[in-house]
Image (cartoon, rainbow, N blue to C red):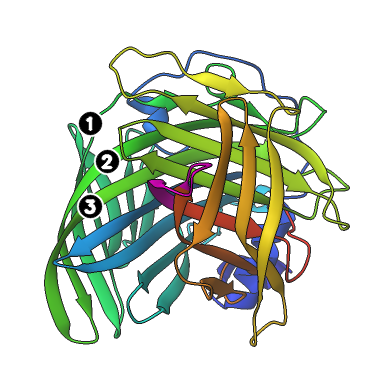
Amino acid sequence: MQRCWTDLSRRCLLAASLASLHWPAPALVVRKLQFPRDLGSHPDFAIEWWYLSGHLRAQQRDFGFQLTFFRTRVPTTQALRSRFAARQLIFAHAAVTDVDEQKLWHDQRIARDGFGVAQASEADTSLRLRDWSLAREAETYRARAGTNDFDFDLRLSQTQALLLQGAQGLSRKGPQQEQASYYYSVPQLQAEGTLRLQGRSMPVQGVAWLDHEWSRQLLYGQAVGWDWIGVNLLEGSALTAFQLRDANGRALWAGGSFRGPAPGTATRAFGPSEVIFQPLRRWSSALTRATYPVQWRVQTPLGSYMVKALVDNQELDSRSSTGAVYWEGLSELLDVQGKTVGSGYLEMTGYAEPLRL
């Protein structure tokens, strides 16, 4: 393994990354998050991600987009003096969903932090991996990503205060204290910019959601993955719900939150027994043979909703970067009368194989 610290191969970088996620994890405690400092990177923590997703429109066409940056700490390299030591690894995933064409495009990248290739600032949200980037200036974020098939350049204006998940930003992910993360969201981001698909550029606008989460340990022994939704409601509210599952699909832990649209409205945090996910329809991947629920009934303290994928095949194969196969895609939220009341993203992990975190 020693040669991996100066080897840029994906296999060595991934092995170092996975090693960091099994490092002993002390318990997290409730603390007052400090902004803008906590908008930036936390390199002493094992794992961290900034997850941006949203619903875009170009004339009468609907698109989804996703840009995620992951940072992983490699504990076994921290004491090495070599400037080539891979102390922090940066991964990035980008995707675009074309609802009309029922098609998903996606790509992935990986690099060690530094050398002008990848960076995650500790001062504020400022992330880069080659020419992909996510950065904040004042109340506006700028997101850029591109591949041969697609690219987007978006400005995202913050319209609401940060939403602190869980207890003042400490979100429990299991019965033990170390199974938790620091976690905040930025819902109802107003997006505008340019989207290019296979050589055709078009102006777009829409609404987006940003999650930022950092932890020492998220999953415990019995958990194989999770189901999560982050939804911008049409009237301005924000809904989050998630569950962690075992190998039999049984919920081990759940949570989420709701905040109304009025400025100063308190966030309602959901307890582990207050959220129930019930699968209604499933889709099977021809690539991985994994089967995902692409339509759910989600029961919350505020009532029951239906979450429905707008494209069934939104499976992302990231085995050449983070090592995981997961489903993440644009979905709509319907009330009990079947009326569309919001749009957002549904994420499902651990269906192709157990997620290793």
Residues under labels 2 and 1: Cα distance? 6 Å
Q: CA distance from mark 3 to mark 2?
A: 8 Å
Check the image and report above or below for 21 versus 203.
Answer: above
Residue 327: quarter of image:
bottom right
* Residue occupying image coordinates x 55% and y 59%: 86
**Residue sitting at x 59%, y 47%:** 228
Q: Position of residue 61 (x, y in %)?
A: 23, 70
* Residue 154, quarter of the rendered image: bottom left
Neighbourhood count class around disc 2 (C-alpha, 10 Å): few under 14, some 14–19, many 20 upward:
many
Sequence-wise, the earlier of marks 1 and 3 is 1
Residue type beneath disc 3: Gly
Does the CB distance between marks 1 and 3 fall below 8 Å?
Answer: no
**Could you say whether the residue bearing mark 3 is in a helix, strand or loop?**
strand
Residue under label 2, please give it. 189
Q: Which residue is mark 1?
A: 159
Location of residue 236 by image quarter: top left
Q: Residue at x 37, y 30 (%)?
A: 237
Q: Is residue 61 above or below residue 179?
A: below
Position of residue 165 relative to residue 291, above or below, is above
Task: Identify residue type, mark 1.
Answer: Thr
| Earlier residue among tags 3 and 2 | 2
Q: Are marks 2 and 1 in contact (CB under 8 Å)?
A: yes
Q: Is residue 312 magenta?
A: no
30 or 250, which lies in front? 250
Q: Earlier in the sequence, mark 2 or mark 1?
A: 1
